[in-house]
Image (cartoon, helix red, strand yellow):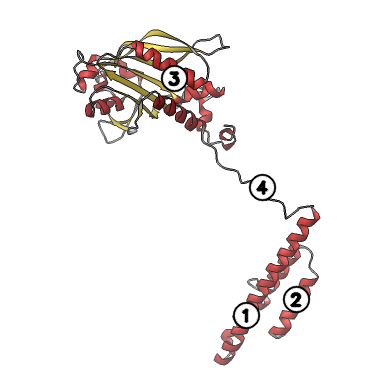
Amino acid sequence: MNLKELKEEVKQALEDISDPKYLESLRIKYLGRKGEVTQILRSLSKKSLAERKKVGKEANQLKQELNHLFNKKLEELKMASDQQVGLDITQPGARVKIGHLHPLTQVENQIRKIFQDLNFSVLEGPEVESSHNNFDALNIPADHPARDMWDTFWLKDFDNLLLRTHTSPMQVRYMRENKPPFQIIVPGRVFRYEATDASHEINFYQFEGLMVGDDVSLANFKYIVGEFFKRFFNKEVKIRFRPSYFPFTEPSVEVDIQIPGKKDWLEVMGAGLVHPNVLKAVGYNPKHYQGFAFGGGVDRLAMLKYGIDDVRLFYSGDVRFVQQF
């Protein structure tokens, strides 16, 4: 059979095809690895140079034409199938789904916005820290029992480097380079070497706040934190302070809130006046300057805001969870 007859044979066969499966079988018969056109091209090596030039050109041209015919027939079958199921091809296409910001990202963005509106600067710091910035400069020397409060990931082969256990080291970094007055917050990821459960993860997100000046007191903090929670929950929130202990603040307090309609008080933040030893470590005179520091969990606030009862859901990678927000 010559190439012209082969082309006509394929055209005739295509007219009788109504099923895409049979169309694919026909395509393989002629254009597959063992198809008739493929065999013709492979047989060229046995022909003379003149025949190879002539037949090769015609066979390649036929291959392109047959590919076009098969593709055209496939489109016709698809259109016929769509019309049978009542598809109106003149209707606009389905809206493409867009991505969702992770709930932790949404909450962090809201925290940033609220504090920026309260005239706080937003800073970021490194996740790998020195033991000096993470502990020593924050009044937690190597032999201090308070170090047990932070289960630490130490970096192998680096004696004094670790994954930060809180965002407080950025306080030290900032105060070493800047003079009061100032007010900053530092959101970021922190790491703790501990067992995971519904309320604990080995990495989570915090935001650290710091305000230093010559007359800053806990009264200033009470206003700031009250305004923050009112804007965050979009309603009035009751607040109370309980005495506590943190090595880098004195006095120290735990901040509890009571959301309207709820009976329980919830612990959401630790705070206090910056310890004089921390001020001295960064070159400040505690007699001239004082300030407050505070820290809260982004994950914790997101759980309260959205009614989530397991912190591990934030890190599950389940798109169905993210798409709810």
**Disc 1 designates what residue?**
61
Which disc number belongs to residue 11?
A: 2
Q: Earlier in the sequence, mark 4 or mark 2?
A: 2
Q: Find residue 241 and report its horizontal and vertical position in percent.
A: 41, 9
Q: Find residue 2 and report its horizontal and vertical position in percent.
A: 70, 86
Rendering quarter of residue 119: top left
- Nearer the observer: mark 4 or 1; the answer is 4
Which residue type does callout 3 highlight?
Answer: Phe
Which disc number belongs to residue 228?
A: 3
Q: Secondary structure at mark 3?
A: helix
Mark 3 neighbour class, 10 Å CA radius: few under 14, some 14 to 19, many 20 or more: some
**Eyeballing the image, is 161 above or below 4?**
above
Which residue type does callout 1 highlight?
Answer: Gln
Q: Secondary structure at mark 2?
A: helix
**Eyeballing the image, is 215 above or below 19?**
above
Which disc number belongs to residue 94?
A: 4
**Eyeballing the image, is 45 above or below 149?**
below
Which residue type does callout 2 highlight?
Answer: Lys
Rendering quarter of residue 296: top left
Q: Nearer the viewer, residue 179 or 314?
A: 179
- Report the residue at 63% width, 84% height from top: 58
Rounded to the nearest angstrom, the CA distance separating label 4 from label 2 is 36 Å
Rounded to the nearest angstrom, the CA distance separating label 4 from label 1 is 39 Å
| Residue 93 seen from this side | yes
Answer with left or right where residue 36 lies relative to residue 300: right
Q: Earlier in the sequence, mark 4 or mark 3?
A: 4
Q: Nearer the viewer, residue 217 or 268?
A: 217
- Nearer the observer: mark 4 or 2; the answer is 4
Which residue type does callout 4 highlight?
Answer: Ala
Rounded to the nearest angstrom, the CA distance separating label 3 from label 1 is 74 Å
Point out the image quarter for the N terminus.
bottom right
Q: Earlier in the sequence, mark 3 or mark 2?
A: 2
